[in-house]
């Protein structure tokens, strides 16, 4: 059995645009991926609304992924594959951080997740897939974001890809398959169709990875 951890924010949790509820298991990408992978794979959902790579939100506490990295890796071990897709919330106005600072936060997160993985019990570290998040075109009602958020997101595929090479991770950019049409009315959260595209892409990556080993 291959254990796959999906670690992300509201677009991993399955936030329905504008409706403030969650997509069903048949709609959100981690569970659609689980169905496509079939027998022999166990998919673990670790999505949290508002989660950042490494920045503390005093308006919405417990969103800093660095604070949860250790217990997450310990509690879900053994793991074979980890998908990390974060960075969208880091572009919120209140954090005042650049795309490079977001990438630095991601680097700290990956290093911490690896450090605290219980290698004494499970010597083989899980393969990490670093996924740059999809595009952002926030509606006027999404006041936590602005035009700079859109600009920063567009820079993350390049900086994340460089980081993936530095840390020996796999890399994928959701912006390669997702467009503005895959976002709901808030311009932030994915439609069911967007979730479907991610499920297909991640399924293909995982199957190829384990097939080639």
Image (cartoon, rainbow, N blue to C red):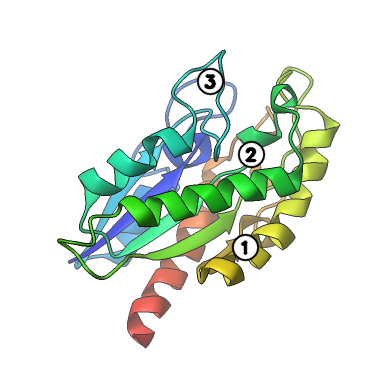
Q: Circle 2 sits in a helix, a strand or a loop, which is it?
A: loop
Q: Whole-percent x and y of residue 24?
A: 36, 36
Work out whether 149 lies above or below 94: below
Query: For residue 182, what is the image quadrant?
Result: top right
What's the CA distance linking mark 3 and mark 2? 19 Å
For the residue carrying disc 1, how many other residues have a C-alpha within 10 Å: few (<14), some (14-19), or many (20+)?
some
Q: Circle 3 sits in a helix, a strand or a loop, which is it?
A: loop
Residue 84 in view in this figure: yes
* Earlier-in-chain disc, 3 versus 2: 3
Work out whether 90 lies above or below 119: above
Work out whether 99 lies above or below 39: above
Q: Which residue is painted at 83% across and 35% down in the image?
A: 148
* Earlier-in-chain disc, 3 versus 1: 3
What's the CA distance linking mark 2 and mark 1? 17 Å
Q: Nearer the viewer, residue 165 or 29?
A: 165
What's the CA distance linking mark 3 and mark 1? 35 Å
* Earlier-in-chain disc, 2 versus 1: 2
For the residue carrying disc 2, how many other residues have a C-alpha within 10 Å: few (<14), some (14-19), or many (20+)?
many
Residue 32 in view in this figure: no
Q: Which residue is painted at 77% across and 52% down in the image?
A: 155
- Mark sitting on residue 127: none
- Mark sitting on residue 88: 2
Residue, disc 1: 163
Work out whether 143 lies above or below 151: above
Q: Nearer the viewer, mark 2 or mark 1?
A: 1
Residue, disc 3: 19
Q: Which residue is painted at 44% across and 32% down in the image?
A: 48
Q: Residue furthest top?
A: 59
Q: Is residue 19 left or right of residue 48?
A: right
Q: Is residue 39 left or right of residue 105?
A: left
Q: Whole-percent x and y of residue 139?
A: 76, 26
């Amino acid at each position: 059995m291959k254990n796959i951890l999906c670690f992300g924010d509201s677009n991993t949790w399955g936030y329905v645009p504008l409706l403030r509820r969650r997509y069903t298991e048949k709609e959100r990408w981690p569970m659609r991926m689980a169905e496509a992978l079939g027998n022999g794979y166990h998919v673990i959902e670790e999505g949290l609304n508002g989660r950042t790579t490494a920045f503390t939100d005093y308006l919405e506490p417990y969103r800093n992924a660095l604070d949860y990295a250790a217990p997450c890796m310990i509690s879900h071990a053994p793991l074979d594959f980890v998908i990390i897709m974060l960075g969208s919330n880091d572009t919120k106005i209140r954090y005042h951080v650049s795309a490079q600072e977001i990438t630095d936060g991601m680097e700290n997160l990956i290093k911490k997740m690896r450090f605290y993985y219980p290698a004494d019990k499970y010597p083989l570290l899980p393969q990490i897939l670093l996924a740059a998040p999809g595009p952002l075109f926030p509606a006027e009602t999404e006041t936590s974001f602005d035009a700079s958020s859109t600009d920063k997101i567009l820079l993350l595929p390049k900086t994340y890809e460089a980081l993936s090479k530095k840390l020996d991770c796999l890399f994928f950019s959701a912006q390669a398959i997702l467009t503005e049409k895959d976002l709901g009315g808030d311009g932030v959260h994915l439609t069911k169709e967007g979730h479907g595209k991610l499920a297909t892409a991640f399924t293909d990556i995982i199957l190829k990875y384990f097939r080639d080993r």
